[in-house]
Every structure is written in C-alpha cells, then in structure tokens.
Image (spheres, rainbow, N blue to C red):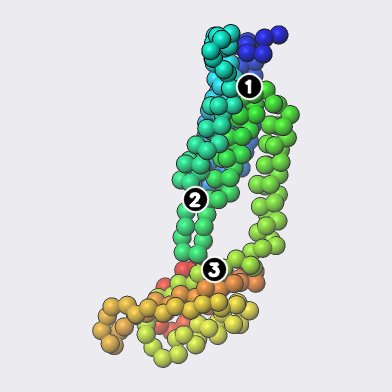
C-alpha cells in the first residue's frame, strides 16, 4: 500500500469522526454557556483533521521528486501554535476572576484530537475525547464542591458615607464565617450630606450557598444602595 495515498472513503471517515468527537466536547461547553461552544469545537476539530490530511496526502505528487523532502508534520505543527490565538479570545478577566481558561484548553485539546484523527490515529483520538468529557462533566462538579471555598470573591458595595457602615458590613461577613482578606474604600462624588462611598471586600467564603443570603443581608443594612459579588 502507498503510504502517501488515501482513498475518498477514508477521507470521509476521518472528517466525519473529527466532526463527531469535536461536537461531543463542544456540546458540554455549549450547555455550560461558554463563548466557544458546539459549532466552534466542531470547526476546530474538523479544520485540524483537514490540515493533517493535507499535510500527509496533499503533496503526494512530489514524493518521488529527487530534490523534494516531504514532512507530514510541517503543516500540523502550526495548528497547535495557531490555535492559541483562538483560545486567547475566550479568556476574560473580571476583577479577581479569570474565566475561559478551561474553554481555551478544550479548544487546544480538540485541535490535537483533530490532528490525530486526520493522521488515522483513531484509538488515541477517541480515548482522549472520552477523558476530556469526563474531565469537563465529572471533575468540574468535583472541583466546585471541593475548592469553592478556596476561591477569592470580590464583594462590591455602594453605600452612603455614614459612621458605622464599614463595621456593620464586617459584622455580617463575620457572622457567616467569611474570611476578609482585603478592604478598599473609595469616595464617590456628592455633597457632604449625601456623600456615597464604594467599598470592596476581597473575601473567601466557606460555602457557595451563602452568596445569596449574604447579598440580602448586606442590602438590608441602612444606607446601602447596591451590592454585587464577583
């Protein structure tokens, strides 16, 4: 068999498998409402498989030329570095929170899966897809359960500048066993009688379920105009 030739049937099989495997991973991202979802993962995986096919079989007419050396990995190597630009677009920073890292990593893995399928490396591609889906579905829930309390949250409070406001808010946080790591206070524009302040608490919470009750308790305090948690 000629290693530089592939028949149309196997081309269809490889591209269809890349579509399927990329779609399975993208489905989880889509259900989690991430920026790069079902179609994006399909396109990345399908495109990677196509580039791998092109890299291996697209230049078979020049294989027997004495002055030409064929490197099947040349085009494929550019996919791994090039996918970083697409992954970077899914990463966002809001306050202390950075989101999109997992989606960027899933795009990078999907590109590798597409390359593997395009090269006919079926078993590693399918096994990697199964492991990625396990990581996204099961380990994501386990991570939230075990490590939620170790994450730092930013509590933003907009309130009137009155004596005792900072102490009252600190008491609410302390009553819920919330660890205060940092406090920032910024004065807003306004007259002396109705001056507003912005207070930012960097905190670590014991459980995720205290966030809703925490917002309610702070909003009930006298002089508080608004509360948000990141």
Mark 1 vs mark 3: in front = 1
Relative to residue 147, is residue 185 depicted above or below? Answer: below
Work out how far the residue at label 1 is from the one at label 3, CA to CA, in angstroms.
45 Å
Q: Which residue is drawn at 58% across and 22% down?
A: 71
> Which residue was labeled with disc 3?
153
**Label drawn at residue 191:** none
x, y percent for residue 215: 51, 72
Crowd rating for badge 3 (residues with CA inside 10 Å; few <14, some 14–19, many 20+): many
Q: How many numbered marks are there?
A: 3
Q: In this view, does 82 lie to the left or right of 207?
A: left
Local secondary structure at mark 1: helix
Q: Can residue 219 be seen in this view?
A: no
Q: Is residue 210 left or right of residue 230?
A: right
> Which residue was labeled with disc 1?
14
Local secondary structure at mark 3: strand
> Which residue was labeled with disc 2?
91
N-term-proximal mark, 2 vs 1 = 1
x, y percent for residue 135: 68, 47
Camera-side residue of 29 and 219: 29
Work out how far the residue at label 2 is from the one at label 1, CA to CA, in angstroms.
30 Å
In the image, farthest residue toward the front: 67
Crowd rating for badge 2 (residues with CA inside 10 Å; few <14, some 14–19, many 20+): some
Q: Is residue 135 left or right of residue 92?
A: right
């Amino acid at each position: 068999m000629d290693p530089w030739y592939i028949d149309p049937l196997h081309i269809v099989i490889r591209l269809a498998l890349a579509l399927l495997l990329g779609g399975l991973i993208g489905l989880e991202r889509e259900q989690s409402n991430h920026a790069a979802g079902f179609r994006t993962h399909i396109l990345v995986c399908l495109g990677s498989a196509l580039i791998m096919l092109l890299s291996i079989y697209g230049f078979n007419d020049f294989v027997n030329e004495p002055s030409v050396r064929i490197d099947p990995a040349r085009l494929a190597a550019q996919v791994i570095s090039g996918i970083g630009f697409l992954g970077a677009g899914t990463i966002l920073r809001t306050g202390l929170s950075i989101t999109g890292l997992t989606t960027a990593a899933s795009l990078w893995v999907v590109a590798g899966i597409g390359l593997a399928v395009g090269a006919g490396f079926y078993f590693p591609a399918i096994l990697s897809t199964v492991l990625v889906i396990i990581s996204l579905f099961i380990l994501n829930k386990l991570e939230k359960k075990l490590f939620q309390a170790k994450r730092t949250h930013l509590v933003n409070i907009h309130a009137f500048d009155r004596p005792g406001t900072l102490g009252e808010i600190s008491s609410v946080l302390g009553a819920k066993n919330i660890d205060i790591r940092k406090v920032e206070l910024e004065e807003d524009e306004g007259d002396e009688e109705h001056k507003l302040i912005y207070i930012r608490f960097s905190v670590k919470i014991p459980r995720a379920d205290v966030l809703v009750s925490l917002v309610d308790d702070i909003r009930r305090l006298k002089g508080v105009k608004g509360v948000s948690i990141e």
